[in-house]
Image (tube, helix red, strand yellow):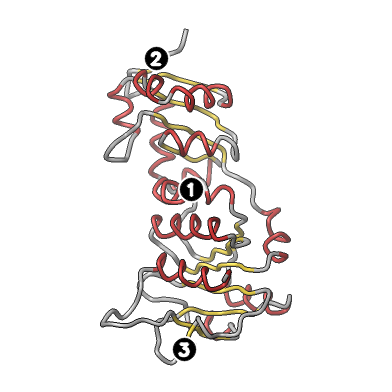
Amino acid sequence: MQTLITAKSNEKIKAAVQLRDSAKARREQGMFFLEGARLCADASGSVEVVRLFYTSKAAEKYCDEVTLLKERAAESYEVSEEIAAKLSDTFSPQGIFCVCKTLDKTHYIDKIYSNAKIVALENIQDPANLGAIARTAEALGIGGAVLCGCCDVYNPKAQRAAMGSLLRLPIITVEDMGLAMKEFEGRGYVTLSSTPSESAEDITVTPLGEKTVCVIGNEGNGVTEKTAMSCMHRVRVPMKGRAESLNASMAAAIIMWELMR
C-alpha cells in the first residue's frame, strides 16, 4: 500500500521545500527539486530521481507520467492536496514533484571545446532567462554553454523555463570568462562579445568561423569590459525603433540563430 503523507511537518516534505528554495541547500546536498508532470518525466531520463511525490488526482490525470516516475524513483509517496500546495511554487500545480540528484558535468569540458558553436553566459541572474536560453540553444543545435557568475542552473524557475534542456545541454562553469575566451581563441575559435552599442559590428554581417563562441552578458549591465576586451569582436543585434536593448534571452536567441545559420 502506498504511503500517504498528510503532515506538513514531515521531514521529507520539509527537505523538498528547502531544496526548492535554497541554492545553498542544493549545492550542499547535491540534490534539486522539480515540479510538473512533463518536466519530471523528461528529467527522469537524464538524472537520478531520489523521491517522487504525487497526489491521487495527478495519478489519474497523468497516469503515464506517474507510472514511469514510480518505476524510476528510489522512493515514491502519495501526498494530500494540502501538502501539494505546500510543495508547489506555481500558479497551477499539477500535483507531481521530484527530488533528484544533481549532475556531474565536469566530463563535458572536452566536449564543450570540441563543439563548433557555443554560447557563453556571463552574470545572467534571472532564472527564467537562463532556462529560456538553454532551451533555445538545444533547439537550435548549439553545442554547449559556458557559464560564469550566473544564477543556479537547478533553480526551479530555470528548470521550468528550460523544460529539461539545462539537464541535457553540455554545460561547464568557469571562474573567469575573459580567460575562458582566450582559451577558446587558442583552440581556434572566433570569440564574440555581444553589446547593444552602435559602435559594435552587426552580427548579421560579422565573419563567423566554423568554430565560434559568443558571450551574452548580464540583463542590466551586459558583458563586463574585461571579458569584452578578451574577445576578438564586439557584435550587436541590429534594431530599429526606439528600443535601446533586448531582453537577454531574446538577444541570445537571435545571436544563436545567426551562429547556426
Q: Helix, strand or loop at disc 1?
A: loop
Image marks 1 and 2: residues in contact by CB distance under 8 Å: no
Tag 2: amino acid? Leu
Q: Which of 60 and 89 is in front in this view?
A: 60
Q: Name the residue under label 1.
A: 154
The residue positioned 60% from the left and 73% from the top of the image is 213
* Mark seen at residue 85: none
Q: Residue 110 lies in what quarter of the image?
A: bottom right
Distance of mark 3 from mark 2, alpha carbons?
60 Å
The residue positioned 59% from the left and 34% from the top of the image is 48
Distance of mark 3 from mark 1, alpha carbons?
34 Å
Instruction: Please state the horizontal and vertical placement of residue 68, each as a whole percent of the image.
Output: 54, 25
Instruction: Please state the horizontal and vertical placement of residue 54, each as a whole percent of the image.
Output: 41, 24
Instruction: Please state the horizontal and vertical placement of residue 230, each as a whole percent of the image.
Output: 59, 83
Q: Mark 2 points at which residue?
A: 4
The residue positioned 53% from the left and 38% from the top of the image is 42
Q: Mark 3 points at which residue?
A: 200
In this view, 32 is above or below 229: above
Q: Residue 184 lies in what quarter of the image?
A: bottom right
Q: Residue 239 lies in what quarter of the image?
A: bottom left
In this view, 166 is above or below 32: below
Image marks 3 and 1: residues in contact by CB distance under 8 Å: no
Q: Nearer the viewer, residue 70 or 7?
A: 70
